[in-house]
Amino acid sequence: MKFDLRLYVLVTSCQPLTIFWHDEGLARFATQEYNAQDKDPNTRQYAHLTNYAINKDSETFKMTDKDIASGKSSKRTLKTVYDRLEKNGVDIHLLKLKIADLIIKTMMAVQPDLIHNYRMCQPSDRMFQICFEVLGFDVLIDEDAKPWLLEVNQAPSFNTDSELDHHVKKSVISDTFKILGLSKANRQKQIDRLQ
């Protein structure tokens, strides 16, 4: 089945560019086997598109606890996919380095615009530390284990339709707060500093 990876990237500063890539994420699988020759409009969307919003309506969508435990669900953890790829001979360490390279180069390409937009929205923050953002990177892995960027979501969904979603997304949010050192006292210090 065709699949993509949803990777979560935290941006804590645009100058200097400071990013964190969460070690867990989601893999979203199409619900019908991919066949480049298939021209049937009734199956094309479920074979060619990996979007959860589309595939959850497919008759072959799998999301039971049994499917998740067996690694055959339509949505899986990143770790589950890495384990499967490794069993198939993919060098996961090298794949992760390639993905990190893709994330870094993407962020470097937009850094000047980030700085400009930040200065326009937060002119009093000369330290570039009052805002943060969690981005959703959608990545395809080809047959040569090369990652390809599909898109970057500025506001990735944190809806939880399953225990799997809850586990992954709660971890992303929790770790984000830990990295940021967010607490009521620290937030007040930042506000006081800007006034």
Image (tube, rainbow, N blue to C red):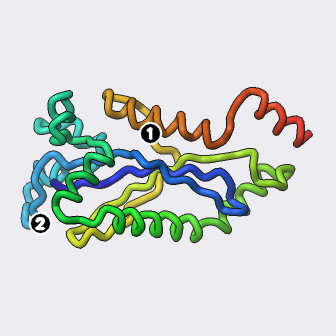
The image shows a total of numbered marks equal to: 2
Q: Earlier along the polypeptide chain: callout 1 or callout 2? A: 2
Image x and y of residue 94, in percent: 35, 68
Q: Nearer the viewer, residue 146 or 37?
A: 146
Give the labeled residue for mark 2: 36
Give the labeled residue for mark 1: 157
Q: Which mark is residue 29?
A: none
Identify the residue shown where x is 42% and y is 59%.
151
Lateral position of residue 14 relative to residue 47, left or right:
right
Judged from the image, the secondary structure of the residue bearing numbered disc 1 is loop
Identify the residue shown where x is 70% and y is 46%.
131
Lateral position of residue 21 relative to residue 92, left or right:
right
Image x and y of residue 12, in percent: 65, 51
In which quadrant will I find the N terminus? bottom left
Q: Nearer the viewer, residue 113 or 85?
A: 85
Judged from the image, the secondary structure of the residue bearing numbered disc 2 is loop
Label 2 crowding class (10 Å Cα cut-off): few <14, some 14-19, many 20+? few
Image x and y of residue 160, in percent: 38, 30
Lateral position of residue 28 relative to residue 64, left or right:
right
In which quadrant will I find the C terminus? top right
Label 1 crowding class (10 Å Cα cut-off): few <14, some 14-19, many 20+? few
Identify the residue shown where x is 18% and y is 41%.
71
Q: Nearer the viewer, residue 36 or 175?
A: 175
Q: Amino acid at mark 1?
A: Ser
Q: Amino acid at mark 2?
A: Ala
